[in-house]
Image (cartoon, rainbow, N blue to C red):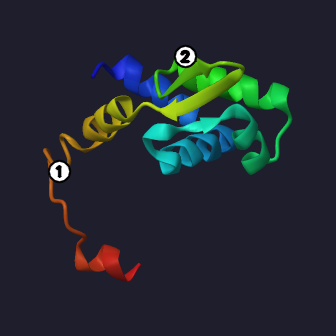
Amino acid sequence: MKLEIAASQMESLGNPTRLRLYRALVRAGFDGLPVGALQQKLDIPASTLSHHCRKLVDAGLVTQERQGTTLICRANYTAMTALIGYLADECCADGRCTESPVEADA
C-alpha cells in the first residue's frame, strides 16, 4: 500500500461521523446496509450522510450498489485489511514492542 492511499483513508476515518458510519458498515458484514437504515442508525440528515458516504467511497473504504431504488453501502473489507496491515506490518521494526516497567506504571 502506498503512503498516500493510507493517509487518505486515515484522513477519511478521522471524522467522528465517518468513523461511526464506517464502524456500522463493518459490523453489518458483507450484506451491508441500505442508506435509509444507516440514516436511522446514525440519526443524521440524508444530505450529511451522503457527504460522508462519498468521502469513504472516494477513499476506497466503502462500496455502494444500487438494488432497484435502494442504495446499499458496504465496507470494503479488502481495503480495511490492507490499511490495518500497512499500519501493523513494521510493528517494532526499529525497537521493542513491549512496555518498559516505567511506562507501564505511568
* Furthest residue in direction bottom, as rendered: 105
Task: Say left or right for 106 vs 78.
Answer: right
Q: Quadrant of the N terminus?
A: top left
The percent coordinates of residue 26 (x first, y second) are: 48, 45
Q: Nearer the viewer, residue 54 or 96?
A: 54
Q: What residue is shown with label 2?
A: 58
Q: Nearer the viewer, residue 95 or 43?
A: 43
Name the N-terminal-most of marks 1 and 2. 2
Q: Secondary structure at mark 1?
A: loop
Point 86% across, 35% down: residue: 45
Circle 1 is placed at which residue position? 92
Q: Amino acid at mark 2?
A: Asp
* 67 up-or-down from 46: above or below: above
- Left or right relative to 18: residue 6: left
**Residue at 23 percent of width and 73 percent of height:** 100
Residue 14 showing in the rendered view? no
